[in-house]
Image (tube, rainbow, N blue to C red):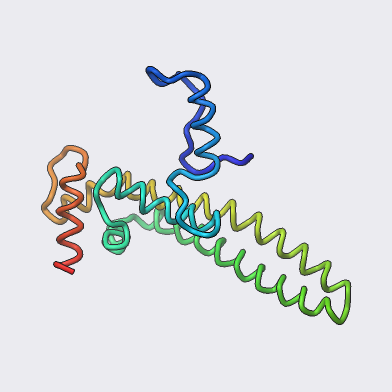
Amino acid sequence: MERAAGAVRAGPRRRGRSPTAERLGRRRNAIALAEPQRPTWLGDQLAAVATRVHAEYGVDLGAAWPRLWLLLAADARHEVRTARAELDSSAVLAGWGLLYLALGILWWPAALAGIVALLVAWAGARRTAARLAELVESTVDLHLADLARALGEATDRAVTPETGRRITARLRKGA
């Protein structure tokens, strides 16, 4: 079972949690870091970031992301762009796999190539979606306070949900 981005790592037991609860928590995190809301695992991986960011900081990721992007250093942007490009490449490979499967109706070796392409695309997309989700969430964790300061909404402390709600209201401009 592969581990999801940001999953709880084995280590010192949390106060008051039994070993069974720890094990079940790790199993749950391997499936989804937030309650599943999309029809696919990939969609849930990416949607979980917005859910977790809103729960932790009170910020709408869709409204905040373009502004966070402008504050990022070139290295951080490169990492996110690379992960997104890899996810796009997996989608393109899946498309080719489907085309080869269709060609397989006329020529059976093409169906084999299509199946292989789809399997490789699926594995790559799962790995890359988890990485992209972790990078986006990490970007928020590391740079949301910078955005809050740039908007004049925060002190030197961590961003609280109250501050996050003010940031969201300001970025949505009343919408």
Q: Position of residue 91 (x, y in %)?
A: 60, 67
Which residue occupies the foreground of this view, 166 or 148? Answer: 166
Residue at 14%, 56% in the rendered image: 151
Q: Position of residue 89 (x, y in %)?
A: 60, 66
The number of callouts visible is: 0
Q: Position of residue 36 (x, y in %)?
A: 47, 51
Q: Is residue 16 above or below residue 61?
A: above
Q: Is residue 15 above or below residue 155?
A: above
Q: Quadrant of residue 100?
A: bottom right
Quadrant location, the C terminus:
bottom left
Residue at 28%, 57% in the rendered image: 60
Q: Is residue 16 above or below residue 72?
A: above
Which residue occupies the foreground of this view, 64 or 47? Answer: 47
Quadrant location, the N terminus:
top right
Q: Residue furthest bottom?
A: 106
Left or right: residue 168 versus residue 107 is left
Q: Position of residue 3 (x, y in %)?
A: 56, 40
Residue at 29%, 48% in the rendered image: 143
Left or right: residue 160 versus residue 89 is left
Left or right: residue 157 versus residue 67 is left
Q: Residue furthest right?
A: 108
Residue at 27%, 59% in the rendered image: 64
